[in-house]
Amino acid sequence: MFVVSKTGGIGPTEKLTFAHEYDHALQDQHFDLTKLGTDEVGQSDRAFARLCVAEGDATLLMYDYLQQAFTPAETIGLLQGSLDPAQTAILATMPPYLRDQLLFPYTSGLSFIQSVFANGGWPAVDALYGARPDSTEQILHPALYASHDLPMTVTIPADVASRLGAGWTAPLQDTLGEFTLDEWLKIAGGLADTVAAGAAAGWGGDRVVVVTGPSGAWGVALVSKWDTPADADEFAAAAGTTAQKLGHADMFRPVAGEVAVVVGSDDDIRARLANVLGFAG
């Protein structure tokens, strides 16, 4: 393990970074981090939630080490280092979604781990590697993890591309989850943070499909389920505002408690994709 230092010495930042990364090595030694499934294709939300376990665990350990081992002078030095203008400028210029995605495992992941730790200490944190969270909803709302609130199954037909016609493919199906839907409403819809977060809460499950066709034609369809009809209505209102702002998206309410959004390269593609998925008519 190598520690990179701008000054050539081992200061507070390097010590804290080493504690964090050394904890990752211990996690891997005891639990095999490949079993977390953080790179699972087609299940991005679940994979992201499980990344929060490893990063939240290491971040809590890091701060625990800081409190026990750092001198007051080292703590002040760490705070001064965190105000590095160059690092702040990099974060400020990043696309908002990439910045939020980068920080989420360390912030919301830490909050989730702190909740688990408060109810069972380090043994409870260790148990997460065998009883892993299944959604960012559980990370954002730890009580839902504790109550075993699992995502609802949402299915998009595997033959959606062939039903659109010759030359069409469906290169991606995935699950977005509460975190990403919140980001979509904020960034694409321009909604206030509290409005977007409230609309994304109550998420039950979702599935998104990307299709591509001849002459550069493309479409994206999101089908989502919500815990209650009221949750679905709240998301539909926010998604409708976002769809209007995008200008090339349509919203559907297939059944009570569900909301679907179809985005496409033109009106005809959106209509065809909606029809194939059973939303139109």
Image (cartoon, helix red, strand yellow):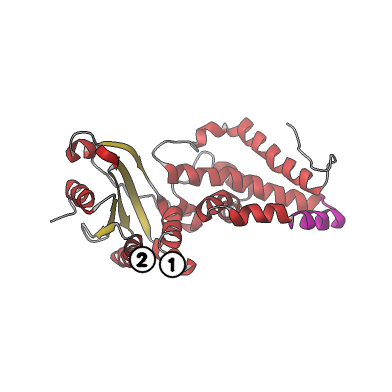
Q: Quadrant of the N terminus?
A: top right
Residue 273 lies in the magenta-colored region: no
Disc 2 marks a residue whose amino acid type is Ala
Label 2, label 1: how many angstroms apart (C-alpha)?
8 Å
Q: Is residue 144 left or right of residue 268?
A: right
Mark 2 or mark 1: whose residue is earlier in sequence? 1
Question: Horizontal and vertical percent for residue 128?
Answer: 54, 43
Secondary structure beneath dot 1 equals loop
Quick check: is 75 in the magenta stretch?
yes
Q: On the image, which quarter does residue 76 sit in?
A: bottom right
At horizontal 83% and vertical 46% (from top left) the residue drawn is: 11
Image quarter hosting the C terminus: bottom left
Counting from the top left corner in percent of width and height, residue 65 is at: 75, 48
Whether residue 122 sits left or right of residue 98 in the image: it is right
Amino acid type, residue under disc 1 in the picture: Leu
Task: Please indicate whether residue 172 sits to the left or right of residue 68 in the image.
Answer: left
Q: Which residue is mark 1?
A: 191
Q: Position of residue 7 (x, y in %)?
A: 83, 43
Q: How many marks?
A: 2
The residue nearer to you, when weighing 28 against 241, is: 241
Q: Is residue 213 visible?
A: no
Q: State the residue at coordinates (41%, 51%).
A: 177
Residue marked by disc 2: 238
For image coordinates 19% across by 40% down, the residue present is 164
Magenta-tinted stretch = 70-83
Q: Is residue 217 visible?
A: yes
Q: Are marks 2 and 1 in contact (CB under 8 Å)?
A: yes
